[in-house]
Amino acid sequence: VAHTEFPAQVSHHKIINNTQFVECNNEKIAGNNAGNDQGNTHQQHGIRATKQNGAASSGFDNVSGSKRSNYHKEEECSLFVAFFTFLSYGVLLFVGYIKEFFSPVTTKEKNREGYVPLYIGFESFYTRNVYRRIQDCWNRTICSVPGAEIDLMERYTPDYGWTMKLTGKTIKCINAGSYNYLGFAENNGPCHDAATQVTKDAGLTTSSPRIELGTLEIHRRLEKLVSEFLGVEDAITFGMGFATNVLNLPSLLGPGCLVLSDEFNHASLILGLRLSGATVKVFRHNDSEDLERKLREALIHGHPRTRRPWKKAMIVVEGIYSMEGSICDLPNFVRIKNKYKTYLYVDEAHSIGALGPHGGGVVDYYGVDPKEVDIHMGTFTKSFGAAGGYIAGSKDLINYLRVTSHAQVYASSMPAPVAQQIITSMTIIMGKDGSSEGRRRIQQLSRNVKYFRQRLRQMGFIVYGHDDSPVVPMLLYLIPKISMFVRELTKRGVAGVGVGFPATKITGGRMRFCLSAAHTKDMLDKILKEVDEVGYLCGSHYSTAVRNSQPVEW
Amino acid sequence: KPGRYLDLGSGDKLLNLGSHSYLNLGERPEVEEAALECLHKYGVGSCGPRGFYGTTEVHLKLEERLANFFNCEKAVLYSYGFSTSASAIPAYSKSGDIIYADEMVNFALQRGLQASRSRVVYFRHNDVEHLEELLEEQARLDKKDPKKANATRKFMVIESIYMNTGKMCPLPELVKLRQKYKLRLYIEESVSFGTLGPNCRGITDHYNIPMKEVDMIMATLETSAASSGGFCVGTKFVIEHQRLSGLGYCFSASLPPMLAAASIKVLDILEAEGSDMVMELQNKCRQMQEKLANIHDKVTVTGEDISPVKHLKLAESTGNREADEGILQKIVEKAESYSVALTLASYLWDREANPPPPSIRITVNKDLTTEEIKKACDSIQKAVVDVMG
């Protein structure tokens, strides 16, 4: 799942004032960072400012420099809390070990006596003994459109978590769990009407890969629109976001290529890189210094076995990391890429539409020239309320992918109503339909994000990630607190998402809120109030930093 | 609108012999209505993976219906057909295990085999004796090292009707081998879902094999089910594991609910009219096979009589794959001018484990009338004569 399962909790290096790397061309930091004084000071004790024109400046930076920081130190928990986290896992696993000693698991499979057991290993042991007990926090069923409010179907378990059954009742909650950043998950409005019309005109599916008989007119229109939206020459779209990474990285890379991949990259990127056969080196999360060091070393030494020069070198990063909530340090990566002449692949699954003054993602947010990033990749699931993924870049790249991408040749094309939903939502975001609805949504999201994050920090919770990212992870550390938080919040009418090991490191249990342009200030206030209450119930106000007591305005 | 007839931009309608819509259920109004109803309720996207509020009632209902359809305990739904095969196999088979796979399995399965990091042993296409030889060899090695053998899982991966050749697998013999050598059997049923068996339940129905002999069946919903995505069915013990370790399930957004609703309607139709539809389709397949066999002596047709996927290839290859492809491509283009839409079976030659010879893939649609089949074969004949003389 993650690159490494070691609990890397204390690996943040001490901050060095490094004068080697002089050039820095991130002059134009555009964006919507409008003077957020509060809440920043306690975050800056680990920030090292970048250099401008060779002059090194160390220590704390002023307000607008917090976006130029290239190594962001998150607040850590105390040793006390870490001890109890390990203890909570330890108790559960110990109990599980004793239980399984007396009744081994293979007695549960029928018709397969004498076969080698299908599941051996820690993963399934963990699932049976830890995950099963709090299973009701995940895989929850909804019966309404996943907009700002959601109808959860209540479930109960008659046998301690082995099976879940529906009671038949529904609970109405505020939805802070679905990826609905710009609020396009709606069942009325222009997107819905257009999708209805297209279903009647073009059917549901083409049942054929793109390269055979599966390309419709709507796919061409979509690709043109996507390339216009991102400011690149051409784009190509696929039916599934996960598959976009898994099926295209092998056609772009091969054995003999070097890839530098961020520590917290998504499972689809890791699988795609593994299938491609390239040599992968992992650098510390968002740390351009570590990246540069590892890149230099790898380029100097060449391929580990043959010592030949690499065929290709690529840096693979994401725009917003969905578990950390951090925004990638794009200007520094672009600088390194230009210096060492490698390719840059940015996976904007969460950031496209959600960041930047025009919704253009992390490239728009930093004001970087889209041509500096070689391969833009993203998905349409999050901000556009549809499904599918795209890759965009130069015409040569896209022409190559049209012929050699595994998805073009073997996997069927995107269904027409889904493509239409993307076209309609993208035209709204770009403002092409003549209204200012797109602009309004982007601004609403940005205001919601700033307000929510500052209030949450002010209350005393440890929140990871950058101030502008709509993914808000709030640290809880202990696994029982995760389940308690999720259940108590649901009782109070807020639906959030809890994540623990193995999706995060073992001391990184957290609650994750995904904000949306569809949330109003009242909804955010309610969420914050309930979170505060439940936080007091289970003692999760871990932050020891200085809290700003000024009231935060929306 | 793509269906039995297709418009490739020239304005006139060509008979569609290339899309994989064997039962033509995409053209049924009730399927479209079911999808639209769901669209009015849920919108288009599901905005989340299955674990985080992306599971709707519709998904659960579809999984239940699929499990009932195949007489199994549970089903798992994926949002893309390719990901089904590529995620299901690595969820069970890890490095150190052995997988016996037919050499002509399709590309998605090959990706799954590669992602699993296990040792993959290919046996010759549909050759049960070769497989038995390989299994005997492994059994001898196992006797020498029983401790290692007790920790090595063995799997067998086959397709019911192979997409790359159109032939059917000899399932009864393979099941016997499975029982003898204690393998776990995974069948990929994309082509045979809804098109084989007296009750249209697929190949286990066709050969009358009880479901407990098969560990898991995987299929896509993009062929007969006129929607998008894929699924795996099997026993609860086997399937529930994928809910946490199937990569394409956990780390990807769920299927858009309107497509799932369309599939539920398709299952309704299959349960009501399935047996008749299968008879009709198999009839048409036999007719098509007969006519295609007599087209020209320079092209041959491979594939079972009753398989809805057939391959038309050159009787004698020129020796060069590109030249073969060029000739076939010309035939396809000529056929377009005679109002038949064909497609060259496309492969990535340098990525396939055992690339099949170049061919034109012809799919049979249940709603083709006898005259249309005759007209199509005549057009193809004219095209072949034009190109090859």
Image (spheres, grey):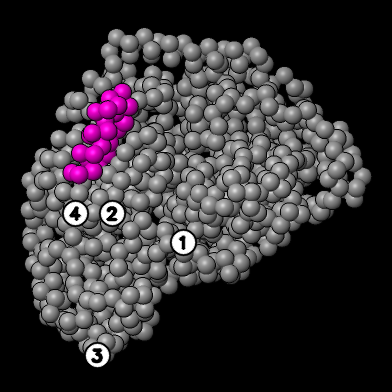
As drawn, the label of residue A78 is none
Q: Are marks 1 and 3 in contact (CB under 8 Å)?
A: no
Q: Secondary structure at mark 3?
A: loop
Mark 2, chain letter? B
Mark 4, chain letter? B
Give the Cα distance between marks 2 and 3.
34 Å
Q: Of the residues under marks 4 and 3, which one precedes in the sequence?
A: 4
Confirm whether residue B342 shows in the render. no
B127 over B71 or under it: above or below: below
Task: Confirm whether the magenta stretch covers residue B150.
Answer: yes
Give the Cα distance between marks 1 and 2.
22 Å
Tell me which amino acid carries mark 4: Asn
Mark 3, chain letter? B
Q: Can you identify the residue that label 4 sits on?
A: B126
Q: Are marks 4 and 1 on the same chain?
A: no
Tell me which amino acid carries mark 1: Ser
Q: Residues within 10 Å of mark 3 (few under 14, many from 20)?
A: few
Q: Can you identify the residue that label 3 sits on?
A: B389
Q: Secondary structure at mark 1?
A: loop
Query: Residue A529, percent across and down?
Result: 59, 26
Q: Are marks 4 and 2 in contact (CB under 8 Å)?
A: no
Query: Residue A41, percent across and down?
Result: 80, 30
Task: Confirm whether the magenta stretch covers residue B371.
Answer: no
Q: Can you identify the residue that label 1 sits on?
A: A405
Give the Cα distance between marks 4 and 1.
29 Å
Give the Cα distance between marks 1 and 3.
35 Å
